[in-house]
Image: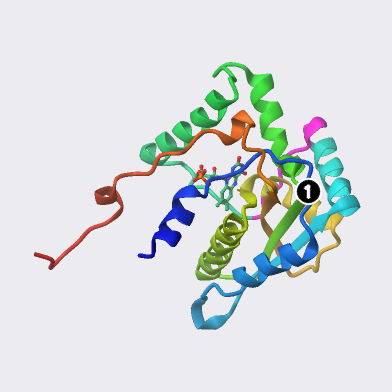
C-alpha cells in the first residue's frame, strides 16, 4: 500500500468543529467528482449529493433547530441501526459516544449537555458547507452500500485537501422535514448529511480518536499458510 494512502486513512477522522473559513464551490465540486469515482453494482451510481452553503444551509439548520426545540417526533424513513442492537454493537456505540462526550467534558448523566451536543448534528456542526445525501426510494440494500462508498470517497477526498468532514446519520431523524424544506423530488429519500469545512483542530471535540475492532474480529482467513 502506498504510504500516502495509509497516512490519509490514518489521519482521517470525523471533524465536528470548523473554523469560520468558507469552502468555495470549485473545491466542493472536486470532492464530489472524486465521490463519483466510487464503484457501484452494475454501475448504477445511486444517490445524490445536495450541497448547501450560505442562506439555504442557514434556513435548513434553523428549521431543524426549531423542530428539535419543539420536540418534534423523529420521522426516519429507513432504519440505520439494527433493532434491537446486538450487545457487541451496542458496546461499540457506547464507546464511541463516551469518547465524544469525554473529549467535551460532558458527564454521563448530563442529559442537557448531551442533548445540546446532539443538536449540533442538526446545525451541521457549524460547518460552512452541508451536504444532504439522498437515494432513490426504490434502492435496494446494495445501492445503499454503493452510496456508502461514494460517501467514504468524499470523506477521503476532503481529507486529502486538508478539509474536515463528518457523516451525519442523525439528519435522517428529520428526513421528511429536510425533504420538504429543500423541496426535493418525491422519489428521493434522505439518507444522511455530511458537514464539510476547515477543521478547527484546537476544538476539544476534534481531539479524540475512535477505536477499531481487532483484525481477527473483522476477518477470517482460510487456505493461507
Ligand atoms: C454515514 C455516517 C453517518 C454518521 N452519523 C453521525 C452522526 O449523526 N453524528 C455524529 O456525531 N457522527 C456521525 N458519524 C461519525 C461516526 O460516529 C464516526 O465515523 C465513527 O465514530 C468513527 O470515528 P471516526 O470517523 O473519527 O474514525 C457518522 C459517520 C458516517 C460514516
Vertical order, 27 against 176 (above or below): below
- Does residue 182 appear to the left or right of 149 in the view shown? right
Taking the view exactly as shown, the residue that stands out farthest to the bottom is 42
* Front in this rendered view, residue 163 or 116: 163
Q: Nearer the viewer, residue 138 or 120?
A: 120
Quarter location, residue 135: bottom right
Quarter holding residue 4? bottom left
* Residue nearest the viewer, comparing 86 with 133: 133
**x and y percent of residue 147 in the render?**
57, 66
Asked whether 204 falls inside the magenta stretch, the response is: no
Picture residue at 82% right of the left edge, 44% below the top:
61
Q: Where residue 108 appears, x then y in whole percent? A: 54, 19
Q: Is residue 103 left or right of residue 218?
A: right
Q: Is residue 135 visible?
A: no
Of helix, strand and loop, which mostly describes the magenta segment? loop
- Near mark 1 (Cα within 10 A), the count class, few <14, some 14-19 or many ≥20, is many
- Residue 171, how many percent across, how many down? 69, 48
**Magenta region:** 68-77
The residue at the point 80 percent across, 42 percent down is: 64
Looking at the image, can residue 183 be seen? Answer: yes
The residue indicated by pointer 1 is 128
Question: Image check: 42 left or right of 26?
Answer: left
Element class at badge 1: loop
Amino acid at each position: 500500500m502506498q504510504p500516502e494512502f495509509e497516512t490519509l486513512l490514518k489521519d482521517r477522522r470525523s471533524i465536528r468543529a470548523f473554523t469560520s473559513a468558507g469552502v468555495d464551490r470549485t473545491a466542493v465540486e472536486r470532492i464530489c467528482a472524486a465521490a463519483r469515482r466510487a464503484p457501484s453494482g452494475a454501475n448504477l451510481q445511486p444517490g445524490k449529493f445536495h450541497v448547501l452553503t450560505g442562506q439555504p444551509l442557514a434556513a435548513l439548520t434553523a428549521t431543524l433547530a426549531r423542530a428539535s426545540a419543539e420536540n418534534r417526533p423523529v420521522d426516519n424513513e429507513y432504519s440505520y441501526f439494527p433493532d434491537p442492537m446486538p450487545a457487541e454493537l451496542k458496546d461499540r456505540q457506547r464507546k464511541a459516544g463516551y469518547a465524544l462526550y469525554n473529549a467535551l467534558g460532558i458527564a454521563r448523566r448530563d442529559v442537557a449537555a448531551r442533548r445540546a451536543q446532539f443538536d449540533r448534528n442538526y446545525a451541521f456542526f457549524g460547518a460552512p458547507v452541508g451536504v444532504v445525501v439522498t437515494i432513490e426510494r426504490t434502492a435496494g440494500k446494495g445501492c445503499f452500500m454503493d452510496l456508502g462508498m461514494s460517501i467514504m470517497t468524499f470523506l477521503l477526498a476532503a481529507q486529502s485537501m486538508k478539509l474536515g468532514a463528518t457523516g451525519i446519520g442523525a439528519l435522517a431523524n428529520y428526513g421528511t422535514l429536510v425533504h420538504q424544506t429543500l423541496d426535493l423530488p418525491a422519489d428521493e429519500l434522505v439518507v444522511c448529511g455530511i458537514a464539510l469545512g476547515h477543521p478547527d483542530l484546537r476544538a476539544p471535540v476534534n481531539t479524540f480518536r475512535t477505536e477499531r475492532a481487532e483484525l481477527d474480529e473483522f476477518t477470517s482467513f482460510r487456505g493461507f499458510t
